[in-house]
Amino acid sequence: MLDFTVHIFSNDFKLKQELLKSLHAFSIDAVFVDNYSLLRPSTKNAMLLDASFDDEKTIDLDLSFPVLKVMKSYPEFERIDFHDFIIYPFQYEELYCRIINLYNLYKNINHYDLVNSKFKSYLSNLSHDVYSPIKLIQTQIRYLSSNTNIENSGEVFKSVLGQLDNVANILLSVPYSSIALDSLVIKNDLSLVNITNLVSDVVSQLDFYAEKQGVKVIYNSITEKAEKPFICMNYTYFWRMVYNLLFNAIKYSLGGGVVRLSLLRNRSILKFVVADTGVGMTPEQLSHIRQYLMSQQEEERNSRFGRGMVVIKLVANYLKATVNVDSKLGVGTTFTIEFKDVYWRLS
């Protein structure tokens, strides 16, 4: 038997038996239906074979499945709602081919609709992860072109190149989160990430943005003589988490504000803290974010918190890290992430 059922509707008993016999001859599962207007197949793998010969029938039919109409002659197209038709009498082989082709057509349409929906989500997510870096790159390039004799041009160039490199990694990480599970994409490219260096790179990449926003960024890293923290992780995802945290902290801080990043070691545990003096959150907003971060669901593609928060949760869940958020309206927000599976070694 094939993986779908043909529902036969006809007032002609002899024709119904003939159709049933012909379909069974080709191992197609078929059943009779007595009420055309109330047809609601219990399975998605269903199609209707309408052999009622009633050209005037107007029905409220669920057209989420294919309909093959058996006609005695060509119908008036504007007066009949059908997906396909076949002229009676017909050869059984012709009926079989029309059914199979029609069913495959609808199956492919449903598949492409699903892919198209995922691709739209993919583009939305992609725009979030590359839009901010590209806008900053454009600003930096304009700044360089209008200020050719600046002392820190080398640092600005380094920032531009660093962001371009990470944007390229995001673009190359297809299949992306909305086409494949994020967890699968993460596992495809794991490496030992030097957390101290990565955070330092992100700070340098966003330093120009912070300066233009009138925000001071202070990075307190582990001392150079101490063992450096490494973690087995997808570099691009970890970079996106740190980038999103720092970018949002700068974005929501007012001019003259301060953003502090800290890497703190407590035995084998590493704490990564991002604290800002920004606009902060209401108690309701803070409660929603805490509930979202604490939930066990691996992925929430339609999260109202935006892709940035989704990435933070994805990375934390994958690394079995804990994320704590404190915030007060008009005072600021602090994110604290604790990583346990950290490798400590001299770099």
Image (cartoon, grey):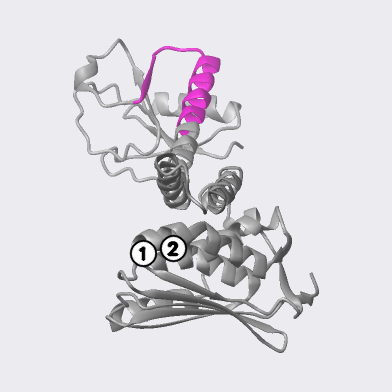
Question: Which three-letter amino acid code belongs to the residue tagged 2?
Answer: Phe
Percent x, y of residue 143: 41, 46
Residue at the outermost right position: 346
- Quick check: can you spot residue 300? no
Q: How many residues crowd around disc 2 within 10 Å: few (fewer than 14), some, or many (20 or more)?
A: many
Question: Which three-letter amino acid code belongs to the residue tagged 1?
Answer: Lys
The residue lying toward the viewer, choosing from 241 and 144, is 144
In the image, is residue 189 part of the stretch drawn in magenta? no
Element class at badge 2: helix
Element class at badge 1: helix
Residue shown at 40%/62% (left/top)?
211
Residue on which the image places disc 2: 247
Residue on which the image places disc 1: 251
If the image is split into quadrants, where does the C terminus sit? bottom right
Give the alpha-carbon distance from disc 2 to disc 1, as whole Å: 6 Å
Place residue 77 in its image quadrant: top left
Q: Is residue 320 left or right of residue 335?
A: right
Q: Is residue 262 left or right of residue 135?
A: right
- Quick check: can you spot residue 41? yes
Tell me, yes or no, whether the two marked residues, 2 and 1, touch with CB atoms within 8 Å. Answer: yes
Q: Which mark is residue 341?
A: none
Magenta segment boundaries in residue numbering: 83-106
The residue lying toward the viewer, choosing from 57 and 228, is 228
Is most of the magenta stretch helix, strand or loop? helix
Residue shown at 60%/77% (left/top)?
321
